[in-house]
Image (cartoon, helix red, strand yellow):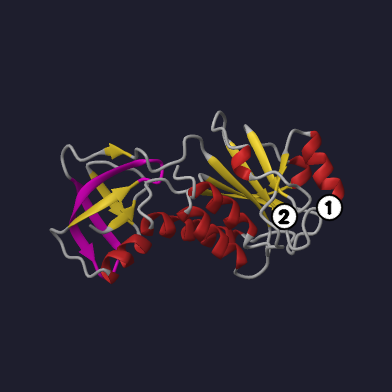
Amino acid sequence: MHRVQVTAISDVMMLGPQATRHLHVLRLQAGERVQVFDGQGAHAEAVVFDLHPDVGRATLHLQPDSVGTVRGAETPQPVTLAVALLKGDKLTDVVRAATELGAANIQLLITQHAEARDIGAQKLTRLRRIASEAARQSERSVTPDVLEPVKLSTYQWNGTLLVAHPGSATRITELLTWDAPLTLLSGPEGGLSDTEMQDLQARGAQAITLGPRILRAETAPIAMLGAIAATGV
């Protein structure tokens, strides 16, 4: 069954131009069923009531007794991926893969050696759209939010913070307890500065290794999430 994200699940749901275009691409017709999800964990079945080719609007009618919440598809505690700003389409690839691998949120960071110092509103909107599309394709009912960049020096996290750092010998699975929310932090090309790393550790962060090889800035965050996904949670 095809899936589409909605703002909220209700008896009658109006879809905007983007979601309507998706239904057109799938060549769906009025009367066909789809699965809808709200990005917060709720999902349901609905029927396409009308599909307008010109105004970019579709109407879905909720199927009775079909509303549910996601179970078993998310990690025991929410995982936030905190990643330094990267140039070009690198962040697009990171956001897409992070969504598929179960990140609950994606926090963009401004670091000392970051390839970029800011991100425009249009690109941030695009990254959020990428996350929504990846959640639909990977059959998640939760869509991670892509949060506006903050300076690493002022970043506040909840629970445990694990930082990818070449100088560490500790593996991620050695620290994975799931007794609190988890944040995984990855730096830019060239890594975090000594000062940044010392500050994070002084605030309670723990350094982890990603193996004996040096990974690119867009590969490291996916390696961390992949290590968690490989545990089967």
Q: Is residue 122 visible?
A: no
Residue 182 inside the magenta-drawn segment: no
* Identity, as a three-letter code, of the amino acid under mark 1: Ser
Type of amino acid at the residue the image marks with label 2: Gly
Q: Is residue 55 left or right of residue 199?
A: left
* Residue nearest the observer in this picture, 214 or 124: 214
Which quadrant is the C terminus positioned in?
top left
Stretch in magenta: 38-62
Instruction: Label 2, secondary structure: give it.
Output: loop
The residue at the point 81 percent across, 34 percent down is 202
Per the image, the residue denoted by label 2 is 187
Q: Which residue is mark 1?
A: 193
Q: Which mark is residue 69?
A: none
Of mark 1 and mark 2, the one earlier in the sequence is 2
* Closer-to-camera residue (46/104): 104
Which SS class for mark 1?
loop
